[in-house]
């Protein structure tokens, strides 16, 4: 499952969505373009990690750079996080 994160994304809402996606699918990739989006994503990962801790779920967080296609801009490099249930 893939989720795109913007600077306007609410970290608490995204954190809950990450937790649900991991429970339902076992893996999620978060893609962020720009400083504000990366910041919102990192905050959401902190929120999600608290949910995982309380649910006693073990997960891994793998940061990476990825190329993604943006309309009117072509292919650009984004920051991605791959979150996997262990």
Image (cartoon, rainbow, N blue to C red):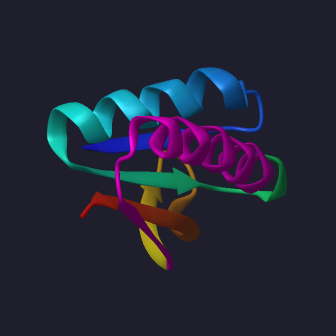
Residue 59 painted magenta = yes
Quadrant in the rendering for residue 5 = top right
Residue at the location (41% across, 40% down)?
3
Task: Pinpoint residue 62: horizontal percent, then vertical percent.
Answer: 45, 74
The answer to whether 9 appears left or right of 74 in the picture is: right
Q: Disc count in the image?
A: 0
Residue ranking furthest to the left: 25
Residue 34 painted magenta = no
Residue at the location (30% across, 60% down)?
84
Looking at the image, residue 33 lies above or below residue 65: above
The answer to whether 41 appears left or right of 60 in the picture is: right
Q: Which residues are magenta?
A: 37-64
Task: Pinpoint residue 35: horizontal percent, then vertical percent.
Answer: 82, 58
Residue at the location (83% across, 48% down)?
36
Viewer-closest of 62 and 3: 62
Q: Is residue 36 visible?
A: yes
Looking at the image, residue 8 lies above or below residue 77: above
Task: Pinpoint residue 60: horizontal percent, then vertical percent.
Answer: 40, 68
Viewer-closest of 86 and 41: 86
Quick one: quadrant of the N terminus?
top left
The answer to whether 44 appears left or right of 54 in the picture is: right
Q: Is residue 9 visible?
A: no
Quick one: quadrant of the C terminus?
bottom left
Quadrant in the rendering for residue 82 = bottom left
Task: Pinpoint residue 48: horizontal percent, then vertical percent.
Answer: 55, 40
Quadrant in the rendering for residue 78 = bottom right
Q: Taken as a whole, is the magenta stretch helix, strand or loop?
A: helix
Residue at the location (60% across, 41% down)?
50
């Amino acid at each position: 499952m893939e989720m795109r994160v913007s600077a306007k994304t609410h970290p608490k809402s995204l954190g809950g969505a990450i937790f649900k996606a991991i429970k339902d699918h076992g893996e999620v990739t978060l893609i962020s373009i720009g400083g504000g989006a990366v910041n919102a994503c990192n905050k959401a990962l902190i929120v999600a990690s608290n949910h995982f801790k309380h649910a006693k779920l073990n997960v891994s967080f793998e940061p990476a750079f990825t190329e993604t296609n943006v309309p009117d801009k072509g292919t650009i490099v984004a920051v991605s996080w791959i979150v996997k249930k262990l």
